[in-house]
Image: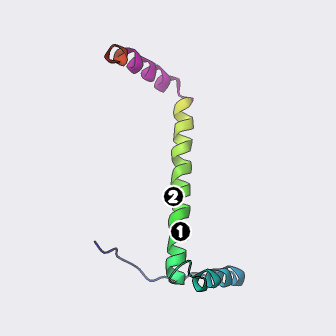
């Protein structure tokens, strides 16, 4: 399945663009586009993981959730 792409324009600092070009020249990516795409995917994954971690912290502090977990553990204990 081919991903749909959209052309866009980014404004980058000169040093960031130079570092990207050096990485491409060193063979770390085939193109600027590939390099930026991988960096964006990595950053989005980090943000998603942070959202999941925040939700888990919230669940750990939710008394209703904790009671529900304890009830499920009690109900499933005979199956172990």
Q: Distance between the residues labelled 2 and 1?
A: 9 Å
24 over 74 or under it: above or below: below
* Residue receiving disc 1: 40
Circle 2: element type: helix
Is residue 11 left or right of 63 when viewed as pictured? Answer: right
Q: Going by the picture, which residue comes out furthest to the front?
A: 27
Residue in the image at 33% along x and 13% along y: 78
14 over 56 or under it: above or below: below
Dot placed on the residue nearer the N-terminal end, 2 or 1: 1
User: How did the renderer colour the structure?
Assistant: rainbow
Residue 7 percent across, percent down from the top left: 44, 83
- Camera-side residue of 10 and 73: 73
Tell me if mark 2 has few (under 14), some (14-19) or many (20+) residues whose alpha carbon lies within 10 angstroms of its own: few
64 over 51 or under it: above or below: above
Residue 61 percent across, percent down from the top left: 57, 29
Residue in the image at 38% along x and 20% along y: 72
Residue in the image at 69% along x and 81% along y: 13
Residue 46 percent across, percent down from the top left: 55, 56
Q: Is the magenta stretch mostly helix, strand or loop?
A: helix
What span is colored magenta in the figure? Answer: 61-74
Q: Does the magenta stretch include residue 68?
A: yes
- Camera-side residue of 3 and 67: 3
User: In the rendered view of the protein, which quadrant contains the N terminus?
Assistant: bottom left
User: In the rendered view of the protein, which quadrant contains the C terminus?
Assistant: top left
Residue 57 percent across, percent down from the top left: 57, 36
- Using the image, tell me which numbered label, if any, was put on residue 49: none
Tell me if mark 1 has few (under 14), some (14-19) or many (20+) residues whose alpha carbon lies within 10 angstroms of its own: few
- Using the image, tell me which numbered label, if any, was put on residue 45: 2
């Amino acid at each position: 399945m081919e991903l749909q792409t959209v052309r866009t324009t980014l404004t980058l600092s000169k040093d960031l663009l130079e570092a990207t070009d050096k990485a491409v020249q060193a063979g770390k990516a085939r193109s600027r586009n590939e390099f930026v795409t991988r960096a964006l995917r990595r950053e989005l994954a980090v943000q998603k993981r942070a959202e999941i971690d925040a939700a888990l912290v919230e669940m750990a502090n939710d008394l209703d959730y904790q009671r529900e977990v304890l009830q499920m553990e009690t109900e499933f204990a005979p199956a172990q």
